Amino acid sequence: MMNEIETRKARKLIQPCGLHCVKVKDLGVSFGSQVVLSHVDLHVHCGQMLAVIGKNGAGKTTLIRAMLEEVPHTGRVEFRSVEAGNLKKLRIGYVPQKLNIDRSTPMDVYDLIASFKSKYPIFLRSKKLYQEIKDALAIFQAEDLIDQPVGQLSGGQLQRVLLSMAVMDDPDLLLLDEPVAGIDQNGLDLFYKNMVYLRDHYDAAIIIISHDLDYVKKYADQVVLLDQTVKAHGTPKEVYDSEAFHQIFGEVEP
């Protein structure tokens, strides 16, 4: 018999249909005369995890910012129904690389999420919203954090809270910009297990920026090697065996 958390999770399951995809077409970003990204093409289906890897300064965070329409860019980002062939507006969930939070803030986890999800003042607590937030937190084994002050959360706890916030609106695309920077080994293991859960049970495409080459090799469905433009794209094995990978990273332990 399922326990309470498993029951909550089961309510949220949306089996990936495999009939939707996200496409980035010929995306480019320049700041003045400096070209940061050029002719970037990506393609990821719902229920897939695509990892973007590359050295510092390769344009990975700029790619995320362009997809979020935070910086001007050329090219297009599309969400397409393979079944119907039509284009739809993307619902995007986003987990940033880091979030600067005042350690002395009295805001708790409920207040943080409710401030983004509700049009009403957060001091007017809604029992319905409280339960919705608790259900979302339960997906990442974080429901016990709902009343905890945000400033007292560890890096791993805050990351799970941000993931819960990102998936509450059932996004078509989940963008993760190095969300585990500074997280310990146990936190890394839990994070990637959560990614597998999202990949297998949500009708969303996942794009993650990562420096964790071993974890990417183990968990990603597709990998893009970025250095201003796409240098290699394919399965982890295909990309890790490519000449471009060895030129950028050198020899990596198998």
Image (spheres, grey):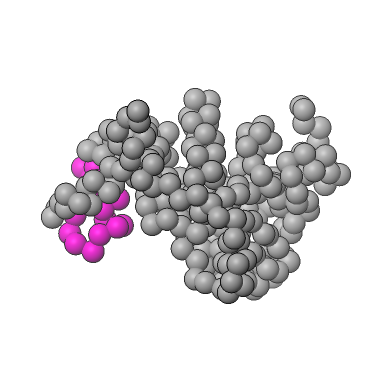
Quadrant of the frame with the C terminus:
top right
In the displayed structure, does residue 125 sit left or right of residue 68? left
Q: Residue at point 66% right, 44% down?
A: 221
Please, which residue is most extreme toward the right here? Answer: 243
Quadrant of the frame with the N terminus:
top left
Image location (x, y in percent) of residue 60: 63, 53
Q: Residue at point 46% right, 57% down?
A: 171
Question: Is 108 one of the magenta-colored residues?
Answer: yes
Q: Nearer the viewer, residue 213 or 152?
A: 213
Image location (x, y in percent) of residue 191: 50, 35
Range of magenta residues = 102-122
Question: Is 46 one of the magenta-colored residues?
Answer: no
Q: Residue at point 26% right, 53% down?
A: 114
In the displayed structure, does residue 110 sit left or right of residue 165? left
Image quadrant in which you'd find residue 142: top left
Image location (x, y in percent) of residue 22: 60, 62
- Say if residue 147 shows up in the picture: yes
